[in-house]
Image (tube, rainbow, N blue to C red):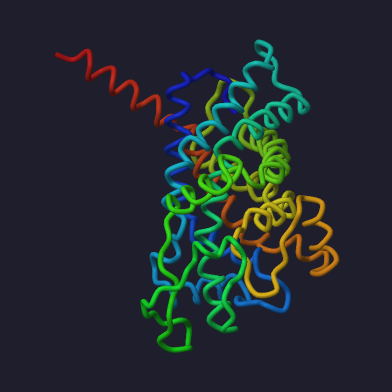
Amino acid sequence: MAEKQISLPAKLINGGAAGIIGVSCVFPIDLVKTRLQNQRSGQQVYKSMLDCLMKTLRSEGYFGMYRGAAVNLTLVTPEKAIKLAANDYFRHLLAKDGVALSLSKEMLAGCGAGTCQVIITTPMEMLKIQLQDAGRLASQQLVSRVPCSSPGCKLLAVSPVLARAYNVGPIAFPRRISATQIAVELLHTQGIKGLYKGLGATLLRDVPFSVIYFPLFAHLNRAGHNSLEEKAPFFRSFLAGCMAGSVAAVSVNPCDVIKTRLQSMGKGRNEESYNGIIDCARKLWMKEGPLAFLKGAGCRALVIAPLFGIAQGIYFIGVGEFLIELYQYGRLSP
C-alpha cells in the first residue's frame, strides 16, 4: 500500500465514497446474513441464503431487500472514512522513513482503526439490525399466529395493511418503521446507552477484523512491487480488498453472530434473551451447537469481500484528491 500521505479531507471523502458505493452493491446479502444469524434451531423461516432472498423479494418486494439501507448509507460515510483514514494515520505514526512496517506494527495500526470506528459502527449496526430483522419476526408471527412479546417488539406493531406473505394469502403485515423511530424510542427509554448496546461485542468483532484485514491487504496490495511509493492499480487493490476481506470476515464470524444476537431487540416465539457476551456464547454452544457460530459466514464473506474490494479500490484511486483539486481550481479560476 502506498505510504505517500494524502490530506485528511481527501481521505475522508475517499472513505465515504467507497463506503456508499460498496454498501449499495451488497446490502441485500447483508440483510440475508442478519436474518440467518438471528433465526434459531427448530424455528427456521429460511432454509438458505437463496431461500431467504427469494422469500424476502416475494413478500416484501425489491425495496424490502434494502430495509435498513438508509441508516447504513447515512452512517457508512463517517464509519468507513474513520476506519480507512485512522489506519493510514496509525501506519504513518508508526512508520520510519523508507522502511516498511513490521507485521506487528501493521496489526497495531489495524487495532487502532478498529477501535476508532466503533463510535459510529455500534449505533449504525444497532439500528440497521432492527430494520433488517423485522421481516423475519413478522413472518414467524404470521406462521405461528403467536404475537411477539418482548419489549423490542412494540416497534413492530401490526397494522391492518394487507400484504401477501409467501404462499399464505392476504394477511396483516407489520407497518414500516424507520431508524428515526427506533432511535427516538431507544433514547427515550434507555438514553444514549441504548444506541450503544452491544458495544463490547462490536469491539470484539471489529478490532480482530482490522488486525487481520489491514496487514493482509497491505501485503497483497504491494505484492510484486519493489517501491513503497508506487501506487497499485485499481484492479489489484480491488482483488486484495476482496481476498483480505473474506478471510477476515470468516475469521471473526462467531463474534458477529454474538453481536447480532445481543443487538436484536425483537424476539420471536421461544427466543431467549442474553445477559452479555459470555452468556450469549454459552447459550449458543449449549442450545444450537458449535455450528451456530458460523451462521451467515458465507453471506458475510460475500458482503465483506466486494464491499472492501470496492472500498479499497475507490480509496486508492483518490476520488477525494480529485474533488478537492477541482474545488480549488474552481475557486482560483476567474
Residue 240 in sight: no
Q: Position of residue 36 (x, y in %)?
A: 63, 67
Q: Quadrant of residue 137?
A: bottom right
Relative height, residue 315 to residue 209 (above, below): above
Relative height, residue 221 to residue 330 (above, below): below
**Which residue in the rendered view is the most extreme toward the top?**
97
Would residue 295 appear left or right of 326 to someone viewing this image?
right
Q: Position of residue 191 (x, y in %)?
A: 56, 42
Pick the residue in front: 128 or 195: 195
Q: Position of residue 265 (x, y in %)?
A: 60, 58
Relative height, residue 140 to residue 316 (above, below): below
Q: Quadrant of the C terminus?
A: top left
Q: Position of residue 282 (x, y in %)?
A: 84, 59
The structure residue drawn at horizontal position 49% and vertical position 62%, both measured from the top left corner, is: 155
Q: Quadrant of the N terminus?
A: top right
Relative height, residue 52 to residue 301 (above, below): below
Would residue 33 appear left or right of 10 to someone viewing this image?
right
